[in-house]
Image (cartoon, rainbow, N blue to C red):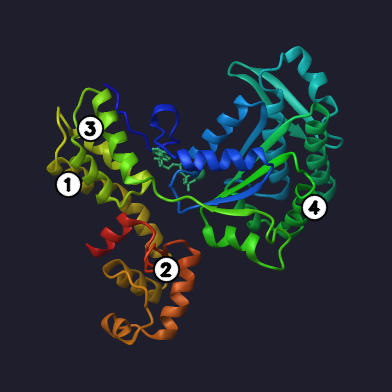
Amino acid sequence: MQNPFTIGIAKNEDFCNRRQELADLVNYAKNGQKVVLYSPRRYGKSSLVRQVLKELEKVNFLTVYVDLFSISSEQDFISTLATGILKRIGSGADPRSLGDKVKNLFGRLIPVFEVTPEGLGFSVKFDRSTKLELLLDDLMEGVYNYIKKKQLRACIALDEFQEVTELAESKKIEGILRSHIQLQKEIAYFYIGSRRRILKDIFTDKSRPFYKSAFLYTLKEIPKEDFIPHIEKRFKESSKKCPSDTAEKIYDTVRGYPYYVQKLALLTWDITQKACNNDLIDVAYKLLLKMETPGFEGIWSGLTLIQKAVLKALAKEPTASPFAKEYLERYGLTIGGVQKAIHALLSKDLIGKDTEDKYRLTDPVMGDWLRE
Ligand SMILES: Nc1ncnc2c1ncn2[C@@H]1O[C@H](COP(=O)(O)OP(=O)(O)OP(=O)(O)O)[C@@H](O)[C@H]1O
Ligand SMILES: [Mg+2]
């Protein structure tokens, strides 16, 4: 029997709940809104957005999803976005009529498609010496004109959008994008990312083009009431048993962090013969910690001494007042050091404020690793 849990994008029966979020985002899209969707890493943003786009396709939206994680230049950004758009416009079309369909889509960007064994492959060509603004105008106008002409509505999801800020000409790109997007009432845009500080700054910094141009939507954990029955059901469907209090322990051990819930359930399932129990979860969790350790070590080695000290203190004792005299004394810290370190750790998304306004580690497993 195949393991019913996944650490990849949650699709179909892997996808648990998120009913409210789905409804909210579908609704925003139907109203042509622009939305910033953010959360810590591996909370389920990409899974959710793909699900939202699927819903929108059912009501005839043109949906575009692009992952900007690996863009390395301005041209790369344009080509990734243009290819994403092209792919959707061309999907399902007869290869013989495709040429006509996309021929006049853009002025400067030239659609290229080829028939491969895996299906149709899309890309764009353009003169690399053309100015960035001309190419981006061409792209944004092209897609908008297409939507208008076909009387469609559309939703464009830009995953890992914060990567744009890494580009040398990011200010220019932000400016051009914004000037088009604000006029495109028929197109909803989702800006998705996990570098929360960087992403938020794009939309909340007064001097930036995107200032106040989108709703900020935070994705939270999947509630316990939903995840527990989901775990139980997945065990049952694969001919094993996981009582609800055991499923709850899986959830609690990793504080409901969606990626870790899946991973711990996956590892526990692997070592479960018939029925899962708490001891098996403990064994699986040790294994999980071991698997995550190289990643934590990598992060750790990139921190300054004071950042390490603050992170350790927060792992031991999350607090709403890290600058309080007793806290500083308890962990041998200074107020100036803590201030700087907290700023840096927040911007690296290694810590955040919880619902009680306490600073704590974003990653609960990293917290356990540090406490060990
Ligand atoms: N609705 C869901 N139901 C069950 N599991 C989920 C759900 N959403 C996400 N997950 C699990 O959480 C993990 C992360 O999912 P996903 O890649 O969608 O998150 P992300 O926030 O886009 O991550 P990243 O920050 O790395 O881009 C995966 O293991 C996935 O299976
Ligand atoms: Mg993602």
Would you place residue 179 above or below residue 314 in this image?
Answer: above
Q: What element carries label 4?
A: helix
Give the alpha-carbon distance from disc 3 to disc 2, as whole Å. Answer: 35 Å
Q: Mark 4 — residue? A: 179
The structure residue drawn at horizontal position 78% and vertical position 36%, both measured from the top left corner, is 143
Give the alpha-carbon distance from disc 3 to disc 1, as whole Å. Answer: 13 Å
Q: Mark 3 — residue? A: 270
Callout 1 amino acid? Asp
Q: Circles 2 and 1: CB distance less than 8 Å?
A: no
What label does residue 282 carry, if any?
Answer: 1
Query: Which circle's residue, 3 or 1, is located before the other in the chain?
Result: 3
Q: Mark 2 — residue? A: 303
Number of the front mark, 4 or 1: 4
Residue 149 location, x and y as percent? 83, 29
The residue carrying pointer 4 sits among few (fewer than 14), some (14 to 19) or many (20 or more) residues within 10 Å by Cα, namely some
> The N terminus lies in which quarter of the figure?
top left
Query: Which circle's residue, 2 or 4, is located before the other in the chain?
Result: 4
The residue carrying pointer 2 sits among few (fewer than 14), some (14 to 19) or many (20 or more) residues within 10 Å by Cα, namely some
Query: Which circle's residue, 3 or 2, is located before the other in the chain?
Result: 3
Residue 242 location, x and y as percent? 20, 34
The structure residue drawn at horizontal position 40% and vertical position 60%, both measured from the top left corner, is 299
Number of the front mark, 3 or 2: 3
